[in-house]
Amino acid sequence: MKITCIGAGYVGGPTMAMIANKCPDIEVTVVDVNEARIAAWNDPDLSKLPVFEPQLDEVVAEARGRNLFFSTEVDTAIREADIIFISVNTPTKTYGAGAGQAADLKWVERCARQIAELVEKDIIIVEKSTVPIRTAAMIKSVLRAVGKGDRVKVLSNPEFLAEGTAVADLSNPDRVLIGGEDETAIETLVSVYAHWVPREKILTTNLWSSELSKLTANAFLAQRVSSINSISALCEETGADVNEVARAVGTDSRIGPKFLKASVGFGGSCFQKDILNLTYLCDYFGLPEVANYWKSVIELNDWQKGRFAQKIIATLFNTIAEKKIGILGFAFKKNTNDTRESAAISVCRDLLIERAHLAIYDPQVSLDQIIRDLEGVGISDAAERAANGEITKVASPLEAAESAHALAVLTEWDEFTSLPYQEIFDHMLKPACLFDGRNILDAKAATEVGFEIYSIGRGRSLDGEWQVR
Ligand code: UDX
Ligand code: ADP
């Protein structure tokens, strides 16, 4: 059997590497139009893979060249495939009807047209990218229009991996979801996953349930983060500690302990995009109340990001122009080099609007990426500011702290849990402030060396001091 995957990004690359790794009898080819990306996937130096994921290098190393291939020869790979996964980007539309809300399906449609032109045998097309409901119908129509509708079966197989834990999620998934109409096609795809996933974890549904389940799962997860973040604000006002509240709430087995970590706001390529997508569908189908319910999850998240930036500005006496602020973490979460929708982007934007100077430390994100992200949110002179030394990428938290007024933790990288507080404090201007957007610093130790610390969701005690425990 031959599998082709179109799109060698965060979803396509790791997923196909795992399939190839677990299924030596299947030949897997991942194609992409982006030559640099394919070259990086083929780089003999495994530290250069375009996606940073713990243990991904090992998974790739075992299969690459054996039954896993990365190529730019899209047409050939389409012609030869028995199963084609579509893993191309589906960002939020930036133009026309549904701009800022609906998913932009132009890359998916382009793939469907390309397949329609080239395919000469019976194949299965699998939607892997997160798509709006009824995208499968669009793919089918494109193929039907050239008389190939009967040759092709379309399945939905959304990916639930989370970045940073992709390898663990792929090798031991909570479930694999396959939606479709054709039993034989479904069974073929089930047999691929059954190489390593227990059958009872492979759920099969109809096409539309599968497509909607992916949007719903992400909406529920994002809602949990917004829920705890909403409570974090109340904790700060009342003197409660959001970690303690989360623990108390999460021990109710009906609620569960996971995904209750208050933060500076959720990011990533999926949550916001999928909720916007969901609300667009609700509006389209005349369900404005449902749309508004889900919109509030994003509104709360935007508010939380803005609230954090305002806290920094207010604490630094409402004037941060030309003050150096160290930023610890720029990725949207730890263990990834992905910055899409990272809360760090909007916090940094708010600080830069006030003309702060930022020294950014992130173990995986490049300065070029940071500049592109800031330009994308309206800091059009980001490159110029970087050239002037007003936005710098530094090599360590200590360097970020050098002569800084404040440090702000925006990503929960493990290394930030054991910072040398005394040394950092000694290098900073006074008063030295710490803003913990992830609740991972040792607030007690930091306070003892003299820091003024603000942690998301931790209120003041009766005598007005920040609660540090
Ligand atoms: C998410 C879904 O988890 C995954 O199933 C889906 O396939 C893709 O979208 P991902 O975006 O990679 O995965 O990361 P996730 O771990 O879900 O985190 C999303 C954001 O929420 C991050 O910014 C993270 O820091 C934040 N978050 C998560 C919190 O702020 N608190 C939490 O308790 C959990
Ligand atoms: P995701 O996070 O969903 O994996 P990415 O943006 O990381 O999204 O990856 C999508 C990849 O799909 C990109 O590398 C892009 O170049 C590729 N791509 C988009 N359209 C096509 C196409 N028609 N043929 C081949 N590759 C494509």
Image (cartoon, grey):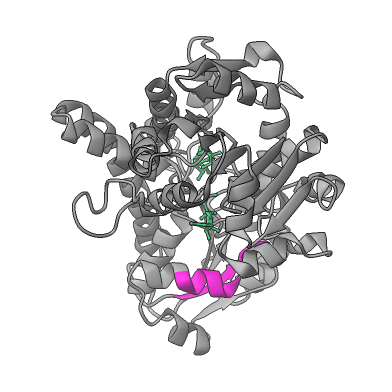
**Is residue 311 or residue 83 the one in the foreground?**
83
User: x, y percentage for residue 410?
Assistant: 53, 54
User: x, y percentage for residue 118?
Assistant: 51, 51
**Is residue 190 or residue 185 the one in the foreground?**
185
User: Is 361 within the magenta?
Assistant: yes
**Is residue 184 or residue 314 the one in the foreground?**
184
- State whether residue 109 appears in this view: yes
- With respect to residue 222, does 163 lie above or below? below
User: x, y percentage for residue 218?
Assistant: 44, 32
Q: Quadrant of the C terminus?
A: top right
Tell me which segment is drawn in magenta: 357-372
Q: Quadrant of residue 345?
A: bottom left
The residue positioned 76% from the left and 40% from the top of the image is 20
- With respect to residue 267, does 350 lie above or below? below
Q: Quadrant of residue 43?
A: bottom right
Q: Quadrant of the N terminus?
A: top right
Apparent side of residue 469 relative to residue 143 in the rendered image (left or right): right
User: x, y percentage for residue 388?
Assistant: 49, 90
The residue positioned 57% from the left and 18% from the top of the image is 184
Residue projecting furthest to the bottom? 388
The residue positioned 63% from the left and 45% from the top of the image is 4
Figure label count? 0
- State whether residue 441 appears in this view: no
User: Is 358 within the magenta?
Assistant: yes
Apparent side of residue 206 relative to residue 7 in the rendered image (left or right): left
- With respect to residue 429, does 249 lie above or below? above
The residue positioned 56% from the left and 25% from the top of the image is 258
**Is residue 32 or residue 129 the one in the foreground?**
32
